[in-house]
Image (cartoon, helix red, strand yellow):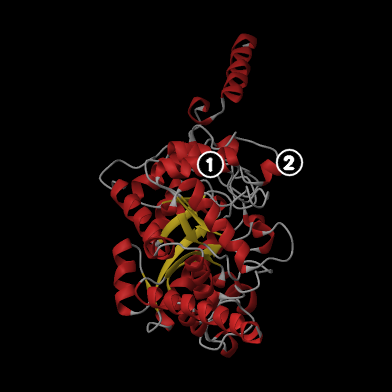
Amino acid sequence: MWTCWWLWPLVAVCTADQFLDQAKRIMQNTPVIDGHNDLPWQLLRRFNNELRQKNANLTSLTGTHTNIPKLKAGFVGGQFWSAYTPCDTQNKDAVKRTLEQIDVIHRMCQMYPETFQCVTTSQGIREAFRAGKVASLIGVEGGHSIDSSLGVLRALYLLGMRYLTLTHSCNTPWADNWLVDTGDHDAQHSGLSDDFGKSVVREMNRLGVIIDLAHVSVATMKAALNQSQAPVIFSHSSAFALCKHRRNVPDDVLQLVKQTGSLVMVNFYNDYVACKREANLSQVADHLDHIKKVAGAGAVGFGGDFDGVTRLPVGLEDVSKYPNLVAELLRRQWTEAEVRGALADNLLRVFEAVEQASDHARDPEETPIEQNYLDSSCRTSYGYSAAPRLHLKPASLLASLTALLLGLRLL
């Protein structure tokens, strides 16, 4: 009897070690590709992107969820770094700020070539894996970063952007954000605008830019999933059924994710995991289980949102803790193939499908957004025709024609 009291804790510890050892073995060959990390935002906020400051050294950086030793301990082999600029830059300097964040990601690769390898293709990710480096990709977080310009969208693609989050926590002139579903913001487009919003999706498909639906309204989710000719991702969102936060993905949308071969990369922020300030690793695994159950094992990925959030679950305090989560999935009887899918293979499949759907030989989208949709207080109007029929909304066009006819009559 007394033997049992000390034997069972020992068995539990040995079993946990067994799953952790198995997790690390798997991750040596299939490291994690994380969908969203805000380290570049921390570099701007803390160091104004001056990477040569002593305290900004990524090998010894403190006070962040991410640094080079933590990435290595967490078996992170691929990372979409977020080129994020807040919503208060919309209609101001959003493009400039986005370019600066793309620049700092490139400079991370240049300063630490032994660790980071900037890549732009699925094949590039595989090559970085083989080289033992972190495949570093650029995700632009927020449609306001393109300033309603297809030309800017194409330019960001040339600079390495491989996903664009259609909105952040603000509407753009062509897409609605998640706060519409809370009632905090008014819906302006019932999802995507019929003209420019859908042309953004078509152009992203043509270029080979992954459509990211984290932060968008449910109507925008459904519109983009139905419009896109390639799978999409949610780079850092969780399951609404388990935590009824509007940043999460409801089950009817998860069904569309399944039908389109798309991907939900689970967010670790406590408020999206448990809908309260405290959460734990097991609850994150619950979200992974739920998405797997509803949308299939191929629809699951990791999008920790490290360095973009203030509260993380016990057991997932920084990027070094990924093996703990993988061990929990193995303990829950996920197969090795399912685990490898969640780690990297599902994202690689989606990325390859996006690449295959791209067609640079096809003519690019050219029609600009109607000028009336834009805040013109800080804008010039070069390129917009004086002919109102080309770029005015129908109501504005009718008003213009009425004024013109009245003017002619008065003459």
- Residue at (28% x, 49% y) in the render: 356
User: Around disc 2, counting alpha carbons within 10 Å, would you say few (fewer than 14), some (14 to 19), or many (20 or more)?
Assistant: few
Residue position marked by numbered label 2 in the rendering: 183
Q: Is residue 319 left or right of residue 151?
A: right
Q: Given the image, on which type of amino acid does mark 1 rest?
A: Val
- Residue at (47% x, 75% y) in the render: 19
Q: Is residue 321 left or right of residue 365?
A: right
Secondary structure beneath dot 2 equals loop
Q: Given the image, on which type of amino acid does mark 2 rest?
A: Gly
Give residue 180's quadrant in the image: top right
Q: Residue furthest front?
A: 1
- Residue 253 has which mark? 1
Residue 253 location (% of width, % of height): 53, 41
Q: Nearer the viewer, residue 47 or 30?
A: 30
Q: Is residue 359 left or right of residue 273?
A: left
* Position of 350 relative to 184 (above/below): below
Q: Is residue 157 left or right of residue 332?
A: left
In primary-sequence order, the first of circles 2 and 1 is: 2
Secondary structure beneath dot 1 equals helix
